[in-house]
Image (spheres, rainbow, N blue to C red):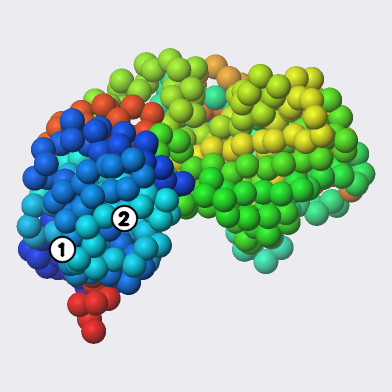
Amino acid sequence: MTYLSRFFKFTLVCMTIFLLQGCVMLYKKKTKTPVHARNIKMDWADYMQTETQKRIIWVFYDGKNAYSTRRLAIRQDSMIVELSPIDKNTHALLFNSTGLTLKKYIEPPQRNTLYFITEEELSADTESLRTENVSHLKHYQNAFGLNFVINGALAFGGTVIVGVAIIYIICNCPRVYTLDHHGNKILHGTLLTGAISKSLEREDMLILDNIAPGNGQVNLSILNELPEREYIDKLEILKAYHTPGTSLAYHAKGPLIEYNELIKPVDAYSANGKDISPLIVHYDSASFTFDEMTFDEQPGSARFTFDKKNLDDNPMLIVSGKQANWLEQTSEYFFRLLGDKYDHWVRRMDKVDPDKYREKTADLGMSMRVWLKTDQGWKKAGIFENAGTTQLKTMGLPLDLSEVSGDKVEIRLESAFKFWELDQVGISNHWREIKEFTPVEVHSATNEEGKDVSPMIKSRDGKYDTLQQAGSFINITFKNEASNNEVYIVRSTGFYHHIKDYQHPPDKKSLRQLARMGTQAAHQLSQHLDAYLRTMAIENVEATK
C-alpha cells in the first residue's frame, strides 16, 4: 500500500469519527469597540427583528467567569440583566485562544451569539452594569450559507473535504526547466498560468534568469507534469538587454521593465493592525500570507505608507510574491462540487469573455488588487495576476500620484484569504519598459516521441502542439551567446485544460449557495475550509493522545 493511500484511509477514518461525534458549525465574527448604550440598543433591536429569541444567547464575560442572561434592558447608561453562570465548554467560541471561528456541536446551535466583554466584576447576583464598563462586543453570527456548503459536501460521501486535505496541486500550467552541466533540472517557473480555457488564451513571458553568460548550448524543457492538456500555439526564445545595475520585473500592463533603487515603505500593516514590515522589506523567505481571519465585507489586505517627498509623480510599484498553493486547493474543492458536469463547465469557460473573467477574478480576490489613496479617496490602481505558485515573481505596476497631495502615499493590496504570498514591496522612481527583443535561433524542438514540432510552434496560427498528458514535453536547444547584461526569455502563446474524472453528480445546492455569496464566495469559503481543516487536525491529534 502506498503512503498516499495509507494517508487517505487514515484521514477518512478520522473524518468519519469526527462526523459521528457531531457536525461542524462555522461563525462570522464582528467586534465593536468602543461600546455605547446607543449601539447596544441598535444591536439588540436588529437581532430581535431578525432572529427568534430562543435562538439568541447573550453572554457577559469579565475575564474570569461567563454568564448568560435571558433579559436585557437598556436604561440610559446601564443594562438590566438576569445572569446565570455558564461553563467554558458551553461557549467555546469565547474561550478559543486560537482565533478559530469554528466549533463542533451535538445540540442545535444558536444562530447568533453576542458576547459583552466587561471590566466590571460579575456574579450571579449582578442585576445591572454600566455600559461604559463594557470594553467591546463580540458578535458571532452563524455563517449559514457556508455551513450548508461544507456540511453538505461532507454528507456527500465525505470525499470533498478529504480530497482538499490531500490533493496538493503545485501549478496548473507548463513548467520550464533547463539542464545544468551535470544534467540536473533547474526550474525557472511556469508559462500561461491562469489560461485555463481557450477563451483565456494569452501570450506569456518567462525570464531565464539562471543562465550564465558564455558559450555552449542551452537545453530547455517545457514539461507537462500534471493531469491536464496544454496547448502551445507559438513558442520562441528571445534575448533582451538591460542596463547594468538594474533588476528585471514583469510589467502588470505589459511585457518587462528594468528598475533600481527600491524605496521601502515607512510602515506596513495588515488589516488587523499587525506590523508586517519585517516580512516585506527584504527579498527573502519571510512572507505575508493574508492569513488573518476577516469576516466583514472586505477581503484580506495589507496597507503600505511611503514618504511622498522621495517619490516622483509616476513611480513604479514593485511587488515580489506569488499565488499560494492554498488557492489551488480551494479551487479543487470547487471543481469537485461540479462532479461529472466538470467537462460541461470547461466548455462554457471556453466561451467566456476574458475581460469580464479577469475583473471577476480580481473581485473574488484570486488576483491581487492594488488601491491608491488619492485626495478623492481610495481608487483602483490595477491588479497583479497569474503569478503562479512555483516561484516568487517580481512584478511592477505604474502609479499616477497626480491626485495625491500631502506628505505620504498610501497603497493597499487586497487578496482573498491565503491566496497570495507577499515577499517584498517597494517603489522605484528609476524604471523603464524593455521594448526591444532579439529572436534567438532555435537549433531543435522535439517532443517526447522525438518528433520535430518546430512547424507547430513557429507562429501564432491556431495550430497547437498539444502536451496531452503528464510526462509530455517539448525539448528545445539553442546556442548561449548572451553577454553580462543580456537575459534569455521564453515567450509563448497558448492555454490548458485540467483533466478531471469525477464520477459523482454535481452538488447543485452547494454551487447555488456559493453563487449567492457573490464576490465574497472565494474569500469566505477559503477561511472556513482552513478553519475546518485546522480543527480537524486538532481533533486528530487529540484522538491520538
Which residue is painted at 86% across and 29% down in the image? 312
**How far from the left and from the top, in percent, is residue 304?**
68, 43
Which badge, 2 or 1, is on the more N-terminal residue?
Answer: 1
Q: Amino acid at mark 2?
A: Leu
Residue 82 place in picture, x, y as percent: 17, 56
Whether residue 45 is visible here, answered yes or no, is yes
- Image coordinates of residue 538 in percent, x first then y, are 29, 70
Identify the residue at horizontal 32%, vertical 48% (top origin). 78
Circle 1 SS class: strand
Residue on which disc 1 sits: 84
Q: Is residue 396 visible?
A: no
> Which image quarter is the N terminus in?
bottom left
Kind of residue sitting beneath label 1: Ser
Element class at badge 2:
strand
Q: CA distance from mark 2 to mark 1?
A: 15 Å
Front-lying residue, 423 or 457: 423
Residue 214 left/right relative to 248: right
Q: Compare residues 490 and 327 and report the one nearer the observer.
A: 327
**What's the residue at 37%, 16% (across, down)?**
351
